[in-house]
């Protein structure tokens, strides 16, 4: 379906901006409104805008008059839509008015013409309810000003065809915009729905006398924002905010109607900048806000938690992908980051606690945490591994786990690795090639992916490496085909690279040595920070008896643990030792009868009592410091101390010590 001729119904700020964008990109545009006088005013505004763009060389070499010549005006919907490939309605946010215009446009447009609404909040399905050809109705929500803002939400109503959606997404790309594909129709779509709980919060802060508009705006301006929330609401229009909250109260949560302060301003026609007064007096120009008056009764996390929460709800409901949500907020709100990237710095527990605090404080279910956040699956949601509408509740027991390999996303269904996530910020990587869990090239590839996946996950502090069944690993899979010596060399480098990642990951790693830990299985264990195992586990390097050497780091790491002489003996003889002997040599840190179960207590103790940043730096000091002169190592140590001095975890650790309680480290 090719779009050449575009009709825009409504020539207000949004309508004229949309017409201008399409004309700039070479489309023939018809603009319709109720009078020629209104249309002439819109044309003058468009011309003024085009001249500014021409002066800045932003018209792709075209002239303003040339672009303007593509726009014709009409006062009849019948005449405006009869040859259109696409009709975009851009009239005020009145559902009945939009329904009337769509009915008339459908009556006169060709059967194949796509009809789209620029509504910012109203469900497209509701607008299209009484139309005959619902499959060609969709949403195209541009952001103000359309000429400058990069985002367009492309909304799929209940009956919109896939062909129409694909056509509109491609069209949005052709006019230089980012198409946010809204896959299910919902009030407010994506960006405005994410913003809605914030508007409610800022109103409830005033209703509950938490602070004045200036005190709260001063706080947000002190955080680097160009406008505080109340100044912004005045700028947009209190009537717009009021209408949005009332609409969300009818369609999403009744709690959205609790906002008494905005109701009073709306009732008294104090609508902000457009009437000269709202939260502020605008009669003498933009209000001056004194940042010295910033309140300490609100934090950025209050707002960020709400954005993250609403984003997760959209993901759970299959409305938009994490990537589209991130880019939608960035481009739609002109920000350097979106809620998805922000969420990666927090754990489910942190966001859950903040949301529950807000919900309780204001008695408002809008702020209640999404199911994924309640159940510890924030990371899975924001990284796209949730199955739509299949969020599972996690029972509050130590043994309950969520298997990441069973979820969709960047971590595919692994064949040789299983990743399990437990409470208390513990993860377990299970080598899954019974019965000996031999390490193949595929296993190394999957192990590399899973290490990178958990690298920056704030909900994991301790990683346990074990094998399926009663064996860790009996070594490399020697049955794999190797074409020549160079490929064999590269295979060695691959193993070294993956195990080096394991030694450098900023988490504490614990190897569970059981049954057999031979060759590559032994090298995997040596790349971990701690090793636990059974008394009878068989440990050794059989490589020299096969005409090889330990090729995945074993020749280097073993000597750093047991000394050069003992390492030489173990490697050149191919001798196997037991777990009991390994413990006496310092290879094993703990001996357990049931290591897979008992290691969980060790992991839990470390995860709960040791600061994550401290662990990451200790790993670097011990692993790298042993390779440099002592004065360099001491210098590294002092730098680590300097870094730790500024962390929140240091303050928390000291406070917990003084208050005789267990610390709650956040890894910051």
Image (cartoon, grey):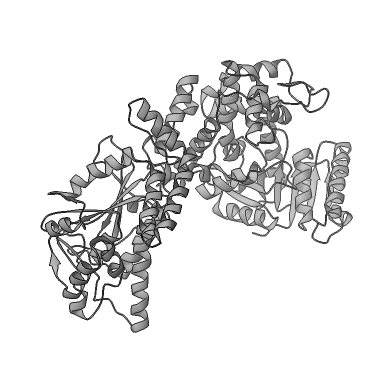
Query: In what quadrant of the picture does the N terminus appear?
Result: bottom right
Closer to us: 427 or 389: 427
In percent of width and height, residue 406 lies at 33, 52
Q: Is residue 61 left or right of residue 105?
A: right
In percent of width and height, residue 310 lies at 51, 36
In percent of width and height, residue 85 lies at 70, 53
In percent of width and height, residue 10 lies at 77, 39
Q: Is residue 262 left or right of residue 377?
A: right
Q: Is residue 193 left or right of residue 140?
A: left
Check the image and report above or below for 303 versus 159: above
Closer to us: 278 or 132: 278
Q: Residue furthest bottom?
A: 484
Q: Is residue 81 visible?
A: no
User: What is the total number of numbered labels drawn onto the structure image?
Assistant: 0
Q: Is residue 303 left or right of residue 171?
A: left
**Residue at screen point 36% across, 37% down:** 375
Closer to us: 91 or 249: 249
**Residue at screen point 78% across, 26% down:** 274
Q: Is residue 662 visible?
A: yes
For residue 33, what is the image quadrant?
Answer: top right
Q: Residue furthest front?
A: 631
Check the image and report above or below for 231 versus 650: above
């Amino acid at each position: 379906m090719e779009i050449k001729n575009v009709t825009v119904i409504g020539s207000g700020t949004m309508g004229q901006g949309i017409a201008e964008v399409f004309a700039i990109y070479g489309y023939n545009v018809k603009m319709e409104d109720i009078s020629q006088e209104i249309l002439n005013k819109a044309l003058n505004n468009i011309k003024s805008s085009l001249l500014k763009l021409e002066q800045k060389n932003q018209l792709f070499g075209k002239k303003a008059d040339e672009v303007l010549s593509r726009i014709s005006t009409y006062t009849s919907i019948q005449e405006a839509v009869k040859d259109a490939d696409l009709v975009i309605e851009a009239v005020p946010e009145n559902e009945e008015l939009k329904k009337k215009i769509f009915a008339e446009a459908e009556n006169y447009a060709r059967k194949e013409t796509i009809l789209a609404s620029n509504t910012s909040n109203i469900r497209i399905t509701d607008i299209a309810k009484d139309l005959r050809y619902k499959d060609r109705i969709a949403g195209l929500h541009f952001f103000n000003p359309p000429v400058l803002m990069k985002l367009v939400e492309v909304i799929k109503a209940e009956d919109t065809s896939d062909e129409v959606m694909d056509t509109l997404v491609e069209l949005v790309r052709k006019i230089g915009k980012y198409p946010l594909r809204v896959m299910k129709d919902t009030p407010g779509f994506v960006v405005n729905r994410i913003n809605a709980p914030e508007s409610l919060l800022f109103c409830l802060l005033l209703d509950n006398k938490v602070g004045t508009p200036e005190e709260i705006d001063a706080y947000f301006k002190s955080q680097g924002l160009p406008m505080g929330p109340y100044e912004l609401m005045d700028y947009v229009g209190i009537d717009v905010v009021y209408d949005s909250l009332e609409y969300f109260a009818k369609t999403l949560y009744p709690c959205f109607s609790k906002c008494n302060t905005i109701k009073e301003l709306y009732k008294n026609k104090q609508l902000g900048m457009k009437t000269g007064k709202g939260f502020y007096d605008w009669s003498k120009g933009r209000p001056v806000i004194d940042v010295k008056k910033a309140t300490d009764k609100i934090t950025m996390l209050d707002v960020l938690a709400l954005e993250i929460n609403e984003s997760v709800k959209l993901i759970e409901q299959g409305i938009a992908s994490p990537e589209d949500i991130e880019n939608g907020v960035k481009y739609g709100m002109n920000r350097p980051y979106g809620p998805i990237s922000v969420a990666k710095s927090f754990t489910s527990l942190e966001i859950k606690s903040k949301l529950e605090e807000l919900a309780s404080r204001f008695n408002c279910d809008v702020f209640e945490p999404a199911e994924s956040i309640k159940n510890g699956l924030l990371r899975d949601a924001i990284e796209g591994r949730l199955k739509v509408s299949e969020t599972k509740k996690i029972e509050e027991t130590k043994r309950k786990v969520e298997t990441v390999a069973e979820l969709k996303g960047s971590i595919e269904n692994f064949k040789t690795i299983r990743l399990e996530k437990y409470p208390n910020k513990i993860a377990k990587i299970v080598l899954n090639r019974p019965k000996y869990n031999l390490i193949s090239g595929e296993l190394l590839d999957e192990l590399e992916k899973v290490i990178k996946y958990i690298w920056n996950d704030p909900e994991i502090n301790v990683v346990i490496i074990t094998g399926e069944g009663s064996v860790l690993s009996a070594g490399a899979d020697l049955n794999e085909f190797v074409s020549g010596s160079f490929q064999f060399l590269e295979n060695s480098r691959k193993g070294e690279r993956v195990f080096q990642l394991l030694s450098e990951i900023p988490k504490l790693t614990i190897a569970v040595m059981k049954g057999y830990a031979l060759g590559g299985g032994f090298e995997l264990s040596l790349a971990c920070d701690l090793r636990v195992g059974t008394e009878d586990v068989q440990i050794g390097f059989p490589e020299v008896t096969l005409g090889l050497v330990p090729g995945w780091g074993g020749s280097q790491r073993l000597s750093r643990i047991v000394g050069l002489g003992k390492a030489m003996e173990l490697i050149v003889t191919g001798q196997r030792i037991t777990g009991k002997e390994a413990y006496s040599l310092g290879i094993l840190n703990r001996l357990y009868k049931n290591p897979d179960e008992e290691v969980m207590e060790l992991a839990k103790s470390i995860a709960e009592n040791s600061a994550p940043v401290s662990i990451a730096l200790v790993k670097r000091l011990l692993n790298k410091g042993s390779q440099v002169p002592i004065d360099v190592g001491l210098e590294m140590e002092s730098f680590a101390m300097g870094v730790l001095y500024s962390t929140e975890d240091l303050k928390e650790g000291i406070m917990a010590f003084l208050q005789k309680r267990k610390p709650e480290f956040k890894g910051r």
